Image: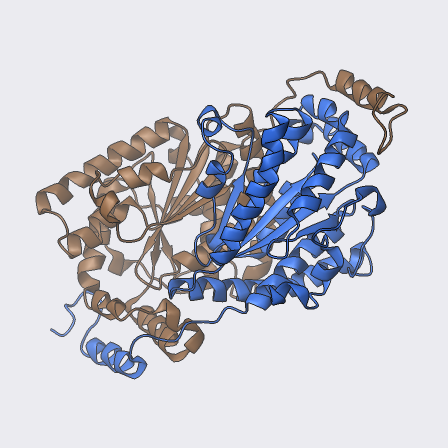
Chain colours: A blue, B brown
Amino acid sequence: MAKHSKDRGLGERLRVPPGEPVDLSARDPRATPGGPKDKKAAPADLAAMGGRLGELQERLWAAGTAGDRRRVLLVLQGMDTSGKGGTVKHVIGLFNPSGCRIKAFKAPTPEERRHPFLWRIRQALPRAGELGIFDRSHYEDVLIARVRELAPATEIGRRYNKINNFEQALADDGVTLVKCFLHISFDEQRDRLLERLDRPDKHWKFNPGDIDERALWPAYQHAYELALERCSTPQAPWYVVPADRKWYRNWAVSRLLLEHLEALDPQYPKADFDVAECRARLLSGDRGTSEGRTPGA
Amino acid sequence: MAKHSKDRGLGERLRVPPGEPVDLSARDPRATPGGPKDKKAAPADLAAMGGRLGELQERLWAAGTAGDRRRVLLVLQGMDTSGKGGTVKHVIGLFNPSGCRIKAFKAPTPEERRHPFLWRIRQALPRAGELGIFDRSHYEDVLIARVRELAPATEIGRRYNKINNFEQALADDGVTLVKCFLHISFDEQRDRLLERLDRPDKHWKFNPGDIDERALWPAYQHAYELALERCSTPQAPWYVVPADRKWYRNWAVSRLLLEHLEALDPQYPKADFDVAECRARLLSGDRGTSEGRTPGA
């Protein structure tokens, strides 16, 4: 996987090196590596990226119409309030929505529970030319499932390998995975939960159960460390995105997508028809034709 | 349907009055009724609407999380190059993509052909709180199906009623339908097809078959007139959007969506939990807790 070993700019800085242990407490959620100077400078930087992202997405889509099977899958994970939804709104809002396939995974339904944990994931994968976005993902099955003991420990232990095999198969099939852990601090989560409680227009985003989950913060951090450690692979690395500053988070995820799309470098397909002949036919067919009259009459 | 009989602003101007005959040749595709002064003024007007559209969409979504079944379905129809895809890009790009469910209908697959024509439509309907967007729709089954004689004439004749009954049921179930016919001129289509031929980065959008379809322009206009006439109902009216000017088209579809969302006036749900108690529990649970330590220890 030579494409992942060469310098990838921001990707190189945020990537979890495959095979190395992960200590989240050593990574500052307020850091802004490689980012805009400050919050004020961020919107212009993001807007400048928007045009380039839009063009690359159109090229990916166009190539897909001509048999190029490649697609991109952005996986967003993070604690409650880490900004998965906000990232979709601000980052994916830069793209043409027609080419995006967004899936937010909730607690599995009874039907989903009757299938292996990757079953519902497969249903939601992006098609050729698409940008897929997962708001939560198959990683929930080694995160909340581990912390809340929703499955036997031996089964959870096996899931890391199953995930790696699954993602290897996706990569082999033309899927570029961009897995982002939105890393917020314990204090930042408190402030964001308080804001949801203090603003009536945010009450709908709050669930009293969020407080119970927060009480398990250390166990969740540990579960994330294990997942990042065991499932950051050369073909599907994890990126730890500092996310206490929303403007940096949006910039960084956009930048990661840009770097991956530039590496893919999708091309507009060549015409599979005779352009000059079509041009002549279009103009000659119109001769004597006008609205309301039968063409050629 | 009192809400449709009172003044709806742009909706009132573009609506096809139920029960009246439709003459598309009498409607100017270059007109800009109610729109911005000119192309230069359009982006600012559109951006100003963006914030309001985003807020109303969030309220619709939030209400949906609390049992409000209402949703919006934008149906886009129009001749090749009329700008269905461009409308999705520029208008739906103003919304939060998480709350949008976009479906582009192509020629039916063999499986879809084995079912009644509305079957595949039902699969793609927006869920509570969502904004659904159809790029083409069940109307293809009375448009290309009529012009290309893909079904017996008697069957096509029955479909108008089936469509009206279907849309009535949707309206009864909380779906606000916004059906837009993007009305372009014969000359404008030629210019847009030529542009696709003259720009290598647009070749992928061109299909030689488009020229054959264009030769049937009068038959298509007639099929559209019939569909608009028979299926513009009080509960699901058709709007004829002049679409030779892209800036007006984008503005008008945005404005129609705004008017409908304002009429729906969705509300943030009230908290179904004790806000003060949650606030106290959140703050007290944190006492003595910090990252890496077990909460409460």
Front residue (pair A95, A138)? A138
Q: Residue at 78% of width from left, 44% of height from top?
A: A244
Residue B6 versus residue A218: which sits nearer the camera? A218
Query: Where is A51 relative to B273, above or below?
Result: below
Instruction: Give the residue at the far right of this rendering.
Output: B288
| Residue B204, percent from left and from top | 38, 69
Q: Residue at x 72, y 65 (%)?
A: A9
Residue B208, located in which quarter of the rendered image?
Answer: bottom left
Residue B40, given in percent of the width and then of the height, sits at 56, 66
Q: Is residue A136 visible?
A: no
Q: Which residue is nearer to you in this view: B18 or B141?
A: B141
In the picture provided, is A7 more to the left or to the right than B68? right
- The quarter of the picture where the N terminus of chain B appears is top left
Q: Is residue A293 above or below residue B257?
A: below
Q: Position of residue B248 (x, y in %)?
A: 46, 59
Which residue appears at 80% of the width and 34% of the height? A191
- Residue B78 position within the rendered picture, expressed as x and y whole percent measured from the top left: 32, 56
Residue B160, by quadrant, is: top left
Left or right placement of residue B277 versus residue A296 in this view: right
Tell which of B168 and B148 is nearer to you.
B148
**Residue at (47, 47) in percent of width and height:** A125
